[in-house]
Amino acid sequence: MSSGITPFGAANPAASTPVAAVSGSIALGPFKRLSNEQLTERIEAIRRKLGPELLILGHHYQQDEVIALSDLRGDSYQLSQQAAASRDCRAIVFCGVHFMAETADILANRPEKLAERGGRRVTVVLPDLAAGCSMADMAAIEQVEAAWDDLGTVIDTNQMIPVTYINSAASLKAFCGRHGGIVCTSSNARAVLEWAFRRGRRVFFFPDQHLGRNTSLAMGIGQEEMPVWDPLAGELGGNSEAAIAGSRVILWKGHCSVHQMFQAAHVHQFRAKYPGIKILVHPECPREVNDIADISGSTSKIIQVVEAAPPGSQWAIGTELHLVNRLKKEHPEQEIHFLSPVVCMCATMYRINLAHLCWSLENLAAGSPVNIIEVDATTARESLVALNRMLEVK
């Protein structure tokens, strides 16, 4: 019996990225007036109707009520991989941000997967198109291409390997694919940089300067060898020719608005108030925080550390607020604090709520999917080159 999704897994000869609306779609407005209980009931009804052909992906930073209705929960790349591996899936609703939905589309609709499904695409939907990423937006493809050309006036770019963080637009992943580069996650950044240095003299790392700097410092690369390229600073990104010529890692001036908020003073305050407390932070935090933390690691590592900690452990955690609060609830045997005194949540992740999720699901089930994220064929192909290189890194 057809679930109603199959038509949207068909090959689409006129790809659009993204499709914000479809003729005959259900309006969002009435959903905003429903209670969470009503929305949950309607979402569950769609999940039952569509069965295994639908996967709702929930990033760790999502609100609890969204996570509760997700089929899979994890970080961005992990979720995309898991969804792409499903043989039954015909539609992905990604409760995350735009670049995550792009990655899911690239992986789920790569050539071998399309061949398995007879050419039918998996439809990827982002419940709210305003759910972007401030970090990803700090590096536009036009800026990166211009920087590459400018750098070529000082150094041999054939000996420079571009590395983009997974938290970036598909266009940047494609740029890396074209230029012998690679993608990294916060979990494998060091292994990726080691891969890059086996192939070139220097690395161009974007868009997050903190992950690039913290990883490079741990590898023994000096601060003086890591100039920061500011695309708004004019000639050579605000650097001298000598600084560029003497570089090993050129860092893009970008950051995560959540992790940028944490300060060394916060660490000192917690240690003074709670002797023996452990500080656990994400490597997107600034160097002055990362250097004095007890443990620095990816979102997945943060979760694993807390899960493995003995009862009575005390933690101050420097990452997104929803995740920290969820860890508090799931581990009442431990004492868990949010590292910053300032409320610090990912505002764009926060945009996806039950109203948007329900609206997008009911449109999908009705045959009028909205907010489709479909990466054009050339960008997808070139991005996949850089993503596959990352998968080969050991």
Image (cartoon, rainbow, N blue to C red):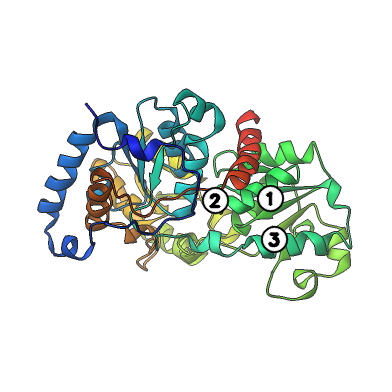
From this viewpoint, is residue 289 visible? yes
Count the marks: 3
| Amino acid type, label 1 | Phe
Mark 2 element type: loop
Whichever of labels 2 and 1 marks the residue nearer the N terminus, that label is: 1
Mark 1 element type: helix
- Picture coordinates of residue 151, whole percent (x, y): 82, 61
Comparing 285 with 186, the one in front is 186
| Amino acid type, label 2 | Pro
Q: Taking 232 as reference, is 62 left or right?
A: left
Quarter of the picture containing the N terminus is top left
Placement of 159 over or under 133, stated as above or below: above
Q: How far apart are marks 2 and 3 (CA)?
A: 23 Å
Q: Distance between the residues labelled 2 and 1?
A: 24 Å
Mark 3 element type: helix
Graded by Cα atoms within 10 Å as few (under 14), some (14 to 19) or many (20 or more), the crowding at tag 3 reads many
Q: Do the residues labelled 1 and 3 touch (CB within 8 Å)?
A: yes
Whichever of labels 2 and 3 marks the residue nearer the N terminus, that label is: 3
Residue drawn at x 31%, y 32% is 53
Placement of 296 over or under 113, stated as above or below: below
Comparing 189 with 382, the one in front is 382
Disc 1 marks which residue?
175
Q: Taking 79 as reference, is 384 left or right?
A: right
| Amino acid type, label 3 | Val
Disc 2 marks which residue?
283
Disc 3 marks which residue?
144
